[in-house]
Image (spheres, rainbow, N blue to C red):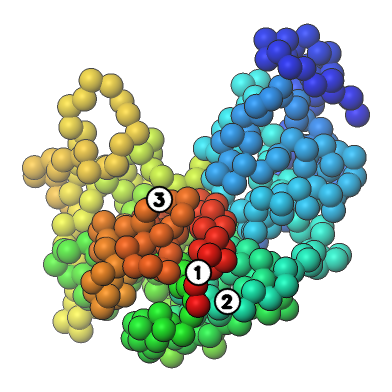
Amino acid sequence: MPDVTLLDDPDSLWLDPSRRERVNIPPVPPPEQSPEESVKNFRPVFLGYSEEQAIIEATRCIHCPKPEPCIVACPLHNDIPTALLAIEERRYEDAANIFRATSNLPEICGRLCPQEILCEGSCTVGGYDRPVNIGKLEAFCSDWQRERQSFPRPQLAPPSGRRVAIVGSGPAGLAVAEELTKLGHAVVVYEDWPLPGGLLRYGIPSFKLDKHIVNEKIAYLESLGIRFVCHTRVGQDIPFDDLYRQYDAVFLGIGAPMSRHIQLPGEDLQGVYQAKEFLARGNVPLDELPAWMRKPLQVGERVVVIGGGDTAVDCVRTARRLQVQQGITNGSVVNYYRGTLFEMRAREEEYAHARAEGVHYEFLATPVRFIGDEQGRVRQIEMQRMRSKPSDQPQRKPSRLRIPIPGSNFIVPADTVVLAIGYEGDPLIPNQVPVLKTTAPGIFKVESEETGRTTLEGIFAAGDDVHGADLIVTAVAAGRFVARAIDEYLRTKNG
């Protein structure tokens, strides 16, 4: 393999022959199930790089002069070039530990981050060929380590005598719980769902993230001494005041779990689902769901999904698999979005998978009402075409910049409708604790995202319940920042 010489002068980048040699290495396509096969099962589509494939792909990194753009673009500032060099040299455990030094969930972020707008979107190689496949390499080395040696056990600090309650076991909550435990604090995590993991278990389809990875991470955290209390919604099953009195600090990692309603006639018809329920019932074993969700989904021949983000793509791909499993050979799954393809917030990779698996897309169209039969079940949707508001230049803006076209209404058939139009904060706790100020329903006001200090002493928040629904990686990054702030608070707290 070429031996790169690192240069301090960015303008001298191409004076190094080894860099030119590296950039000419053809990219290694990620091994995947074929669309014809993947639509028949819920196993991960990405099959994982082999060692030889990973080495070749890692060698495409040209090790840019500092500051490396991929590190800057990563919310966790993972030392990506050093990790890729370790993979290139067959030091896979070292590579995994480099990612773990700055990330609590590399095996998950490597699969789910939108790398095309983060690290890979800033990769210099992308100006000449496909960017280095950083996410798949992150998943490769972290999987290699986890499957052979489990998660590396950190050296835990001596017990501090302080106790912290974590509300929510999603990405932010897990990151805070792990970091505080390593610092010597006793942590108890409260989770509304029957099992820990939050979004990672109940919101991410299995064809993107195998649940055994979540299970192994939870088991590792439990082995560190973290206790999980599930089936417990703080503010309903246990008063928030109880946590405030019993613990030295409380971290709110609730996320943005409430589905946004579309507020249209017929939204309450049978067969009209919110994305949160649809994804949970479609991807999680029935015995791991709340009792009210344990009835299998029957999707029917005509499924319509409304929305233009990653959640909508997850829903259409789930629907296609459910149709195949239920023996529906001539079914259709259509995704309607009121914006254009350019405005979709979904990952390009996932959109391409959906198209390959047989999903049809209709852009610049929005629902007006849902039409049911005499039994109260949805059968049709009245749609309306949209057009752009006048603008001097094209720009990637939310589709609210679209306006309806008069007289363009049309009817489409639907046996199942899934509304994937976004998520909002949960107002339960702030409604009960008015001193906890919010910037929007369920979105906590904090001193800064670095400290996560809310308007109630000893209560901290980070992730989606501070900045709204966002990425897993940004929740992990925020959680790591706030864990340090909580540790400082606990060590200076009197009593």
**Does residue 378 appear left or right of residue 112 in this picture?**
left
**Residue at 43%, 57% in the rendered image:** 452
Q: Quadrant of residue 476?
A: bottom right
In depth, the one of 138 and 182 nearer the eye is 182
Nearer the camera: disc 2 or disc 3: 2
**Residue at 43%, 64% in the rendered image:** 460
The image position of residue 70, as x and y in percent, is 63, 34
Give the label on residue 493, or none: 1
Q: Earlier in the sequence, mark 1 or mark 2?
A: 2
Assign the N terminus to one quadrant of the image. Answer: top right
**Does residue 320 appear left or right of residue 431 in this picture?**
right
Residue at numbered disc 2: 162
The reply to whether residue 319 is visible in this rendering is no
Q: Amino acid at mark 3?
A: Ser
Residue at numbered disc 3: 448
Alpha carbons under labels 2 and 3: distance apart: 24 Å
Disc 3 residue crowd, few under 14, some 14–19, many 20+, Cα 10 Å: few
Callout 2: SS: loop
Q: Amino acid at mark 2?
A: Arg
Above or below, comparing residue 427 to residue 195 in the picture: above
Nearer the camera: disc 1 or disc 2: 1
